[in-house]
Image (cartoon, rainbow, N blue to C red):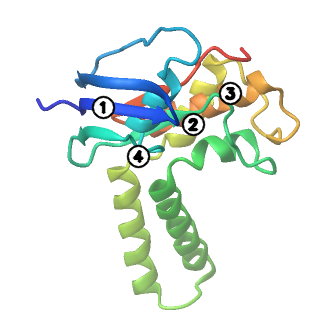
Amino acid sequence: MSPVVTVESLEKAYGPQTVLKGVSFTIDEGERIGLVGKNGTGKSSLARIVAGLEHSDAGTISRRRGAEVAFLEQEPRLADDATVLEEVLSGLTRWRAAKVRHDDASTHLSAGDGDLEALAHEQADAAAEIERLGGWNQEHRAETYLAHLGVTRLDARIGPLSGGEKRRVALAKILVAAPDLAILDEPTNHL
């Protein structure tokens, strides 16, 4: 099995302040790694670089082909007008698009609108895509993760939520997406 991420000789400086120098490591599938250090020593910079959100000054980062990396920011940016459930499911872009296609085709089939044979094919293709992307239980999975994280108001808007609630919603979004690597920056902030 190939590593999810390999980092070699990574370096990063902000002006005269070098925060990372000669950093090398490998993360294999299933590993859980904690990074501990004093403030200002480059932990968040390293996390952001590995997640692909920031560039290093030197060194290389290799990701397994097709590997998905998710990053939980210290201050998650979420859609204030979305509901909790909508926000969590928004991380499943391809699944949601297939679900919309399936629902639209189903609605038109039920109403007898349009080319019924083409609509039946569209519905079947969308259903196959939904199955390929994790199946029909994604909403249930989202609800389960949210419940385990103590978020019970699925129809609440994101905007008025507390910092801790927003953080738990962002974490549920990552868990539902099931990336190959989840990087959590200061995961217990606001909890």
The answer to which of marks 2 and 4 sits earlier in the sequence is 4
Q: Secondary structure at mark 2?
A: helix
Q: Which residue is denoted by mark 3 in the rendering? A: 167
Callout 1 touching callout 4 (CB < 8 Å)? no
Query: Given the image, on which type of amino acid does mark 4 rest?
Result: Gly
Position of residue 92 measured from the top left corner of the image (x, y, whole percent): 50, 49
CA–CA distance between discs 1 and 2? 29 Å
Position of residue 1 measured from the top left corner of the image (x, y, whole percent): 11, 29
Q: Secondary structure at mark 3?
A: helix
Which label belongs to residue 10? Answer: 1
State which mark lies toward you, 1 or 4.
1
Position of residue 185 measured from the top left corner of the image (x, y, whole percent): 54, 24
Q: Which residue is denoted by mark 4 in the rendering? A: 135
The residue located at (47%, 46%) in the rendering is 136
CA–CA distance between discs 2 and 3? 10 Å
The answer to which of marks 2 and 3 sits earlier in the sequence is 3
Q: Is residue 173 left or right of residue 66?
A: right
